[in-house]
Image: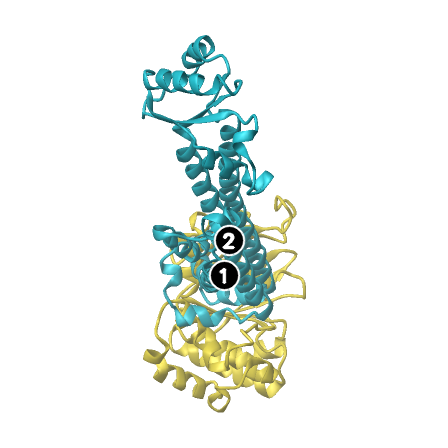
Amino acid sequence: MIELENVAYGYGAKGDAPLLRDLSLTLAPGSFHFLTGPSGAGKTTFLKLCYGALKPTQGQLRLFGDDVAAMPRDGIALVRRRIGVVHQDCKFLDHLPVIDNIALPLTVSGQVMEDQQGNLDDLLTWVGLGARAHAFPPELSGGERQRAALARALILSPEVILADEPTGNVDWEMSQRLLHLLIALNGMGKTVMIATHDLMLIRAAKAQVQARVLRLSGGVLQAAGADL
Amino acid sequence: MNALSALRPDPGADRVVPPSGFTARLVVFTAAAMAFLAVFTLALALAAGRLAEEWDSALARSATLRISAPEEQMPEQTRTALTLLQQTPGVESARALRDEEQRALLEPWFGPDLPVADLPVPRLIEIEETRDGFDPDGLRLRLQAEVPGAVLDTHDRWRRPLIEAAGRLRLLGWVAIALIGAVTAAMVTLAARAALAANAQVIAVLRLVGATDAYIAGAFVRRFTLRTLTGAAVGTGLGALAVALLPSGGEAGGFLTDLRFAGWHWVLPVLFPPLAALVAWAATRSAARRVLSGLS
């Protein structure tokens, strides 16, 4: 699904001072991964590589079998419809109500929202936002925003879900609720990767699901220690 | 996205771009003002063109022979000149102006009671040329020999600068219309770039959920194309109405009261709104592509 082979990435003009290097990883269908590491280690950059927002400066990255380096920008956009992304600081179109924001992937992919109304209602209920469907994003709490972002990431029924610090802005109870939703999605066969520095969350998840924990440190990806 | 599909409504895409009050009003107003100016400039260019053609056709086939001679020789020289003119190839007709006609010509300067017969006023002979025209140099040589007091005026020395001036005015009109189109494109480009920059977060969200750049650009291009079309339609309508309501001075009014559209010329301002929309489509499309390719 998502394959990295000796991938490096740097933000400089030539990418000659790589933030990430020698990344090799395959996200297999139905797998569950945690990505941890200190702040600034490059977790968000790693996830951006995984959904094609950034292209590697070295190595090969394949999304669903296609080499990202050879893909046009619009080709990457089409691949991105197969990957649901949730950010800690999730952004919405503030002039549209929650239900339209969640349906946005349908809109941009040319699908008629009315045809998917049943799925949309089910999804809103599943993430617990049924009563907030017509509220506007600025009216939502942090937890509601995270759940709305998750619902938006799921509306096209993607094969992969990438979550960047999804519990960073919510309390423990809400983070557990979000974790349960992500574990449930993995149970449905979705590939899940969560970037977090919340070790308690990782331990809580490992008690419920078989998850692989990876650690980014010094720009290199490695298996986490035995404590995780 | 081609220009026609930019006009086709897409409710989904139209909603994702937030309404932007200031740029919307700016584009509509600019398009309306530019179309209004373009209509007037077009009327000016067409009037200048008509004027040039009228002057050209009215003066091109006529000439005047002026005979200055002592009173007792005037009838003889006039007869000789007329005979000579009738024998000249390229002369369709020639006739001496009557006293009343000469008085009418002088009346604007000397008043209605001018005693033409008592004054040493030259005799004027009006010459109409055939399609091929006559040889003015040859005619002058013959006149010099047979009618020494005759001066041939082919109107060239004052006809040519007038026609040239009218032609230049017409050209300037078309240049002004092209400039109006360029200014419209520049204004729409600026407004589109401002709107794209102000909506960087919207673009980021759309990309995150899988929108292609073509889709994002299309949403902005459609909005700006429709606004320009609306503004230009309003401006063209008002401009055409204003031109239609200009007072007509008839033949005496001359150039200033000849600013009007006649016959098929009415089709030309109708073309302005779609042309303005086409300019806006191209300008916004180019701006959107540039801005989107610059955003990571």
A116 with respect to A129 (left or right): left
- Residue at the extreme right: A39
Percent coordinates x, y for residue A38 in the rendering: 67, 66
| Residue B283 visible at all | no
Picture residue at 48% right of the left edge, 70% below the top? B16
Dot 1 or dot 2, earlier in sequence: 2
Any part of residue B286 in sight = yes
Q: CA distance from mark 1 to mark 2?
A: 9 Å
SS at mark 2? helix
Instruction: Give coordinates of residue A74: x percent, y percent.
Output: 43, 56
- Which disc is residue A65 wearing? none
Q: Position of residue A208 (x, y in %)?
A: 49, 81
Q: Which residue is mark 1?
A: B242
How crowded is the residue under tag 2: few (<14 C-alpha within 10 Å), some, or many (20+)? many
Helix, strand or loop under label 1: helix
Amino acid type, label 2:
Phe
In which chain is the residue bearing label 2?
B
Which chain appears cyan? B
Q: For the point 56% across and 76% down, which residue is it? A: A94
Disc marking residue B40: 2
Chain painted in yellow in the figure: A
| Contact check, label 1 and label 2, Cβ < 8 Å | yes
